[in-house]
Amino acid sequence: MKKAILILSGILIANFLAAEIYFSGVNEFSYINADRIVENRNYFSDKLSLQASYGNFRLGLKYDFYKPRFNRFALINADMSSSAINTMLKSEKDENYLDEYSLQYESDYWFVQAGTFEAAIGSGMILHNFYNEDFEEDSRLIGGYLNPVYDRWQMQLFGGWLKSDDAALEDEYDRLAAVDGSYNLTDRISLSAAYVLHQSLLNEDKEFCDRYIYSGRLKYASPYIDLETEYAGSQDDNEVEGTAIYATATGYLGKFTLTAAYKNYENFNVRISDLPMVNHIGQQLAHGWDPGRDEEGLMGEIKYLPNYENEFVLNYAEGWSSNYKVRLSNLYAEYKRDFETFSIKAEYEALEQLNKENANSWYKELTPALTFDFLLADFPVLIKAEYQYKEHENIAVSHSHFEPRLQSDIAVGKYSFSLTVENQIGSSEAPEDGDDGDFWIGAEIAASILHSTDIRLFYGKEKGGVVCRNGVCKNQSEFSGLRLSVTTTF
């Protein structure tokens, strides 16, 4: 497929050289000098994206270069042995490859693409193939995509290959095919149905496990209420059956906006699904609990706008497993007031997670925050203060600590400056946390030059922590050193 796309692209470019072709692109260069305990490590990377447009056709290419590739999830600390640290650092290898290649055709009724592309159906509950920037994980498809649109009908048909997530099957691929159709029954009601076949590679002998997914969606929109509901069922060669339900409702009552959401997932913990977590913080029921395996939950939100100057938000969510041994609660509250020359926002978020299924653990996180946004002379200034509290109890061991954090940003013309100070008060056994009394101080300057280039330079230390996206969480290590990025568009 890659070779065919490149050959076809070359033919098109040769035929269109004499015609009117528009070229554009982005180049992203970065340099990192990181203190990784053993030694200062230098990392270089460059990502070049090019696009050529001719009429209804577009050709896109992206090439990535790393020397070596920086792993921000490598939890390196002073308690590790020298050999363990060296093993971790040696896993950061030089890489260079053609990251994306695509040929597109678009008209009023057709969109066709071949090459590398992202794909999503509905909310992403049954299928969402994309490059996850948060975790640097790739589930994009290499294949073909067809999207015809006619009157009240719209369809998506696509198929191709995606990289296997099995570490033992490096450079091997799963296979996937899907069809999704939507019909606007009226101006307010639309119905959709989809079918997906995912073939997961099991071994180097090219044996696959087939998983079949079908789903239906209903969407209703009016000036007073918006409704969306989605149901999906699945079955694989191992006779494992799964179900997923996700529904949202939003009502508009004068100055109030009321939102409710519901989820119910069983045996739907697969990589091609990007499940809505139905809580404000976007976390799974508990750390180490597979999102989609067994969970149910509700979320409600009230937003009140009495006038243009004030805004109130209250959001609460509960989640639980079928046996109630794994549970989550999440509360978020916000008040924002806009004055003539400045604004103030107060926030409070509370998270509590209990896991008595495969670990006797309890976790609590409280995060009050206050943000000021104002003008100093004619320069925009933002100051944000947080005072996060974390408590973790595992069997008979309990730890708690505070994480006060202060951030200050100021913009002066084409330049912006940011300073962040974070401290830890109390001990913790979490690998991403520090020790009692540790400070993380970092400063960043950003500038726009030559109307097409953005430069960002950071120096100092950033605290590590848990990074979550739709129920998937990873421990990010602290950063210490210098980070430079230069982005040029043309």
Image (cartoon, grey):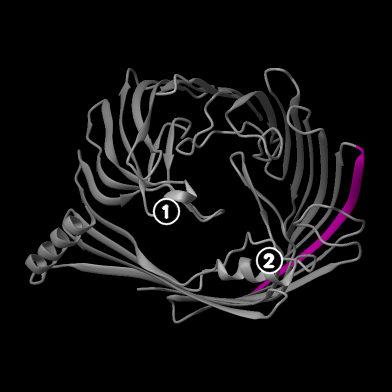
Residue found at x 36% / y 50%: 172
Q: Classify 104 as above or below 226.
A: below
Q: x and y percent of residue 489 in the render?
A: 39, 72
Residue found at x 81% / y 43%: 365
Residue on which the image places disc 1: 170
Visible residue check, residue 299: yes
Which region shows up in magenta?
396-415
Closer to the N terminus: mark 1 or mark 2?
2
Q: Classify 263 as above or below 175.
A: above
Foreground: 157 or 256? 157
Q: x and y percent of residue 434 in the render?
A: 82, 61
Residue on which the image places disc 2: 84
**Amino acid beneath label 1:** Glu
Q: Main secondary structure of the magenta part?
A: strand
Label 1: which secondary element: loop
Foreground: 368 or 463? 463
Does residue 409 show up magenta in the picture?
Answer: yes
Q: x and y percent of residue 287 in the render?
A: 70, 40
Residue 470, disc: none
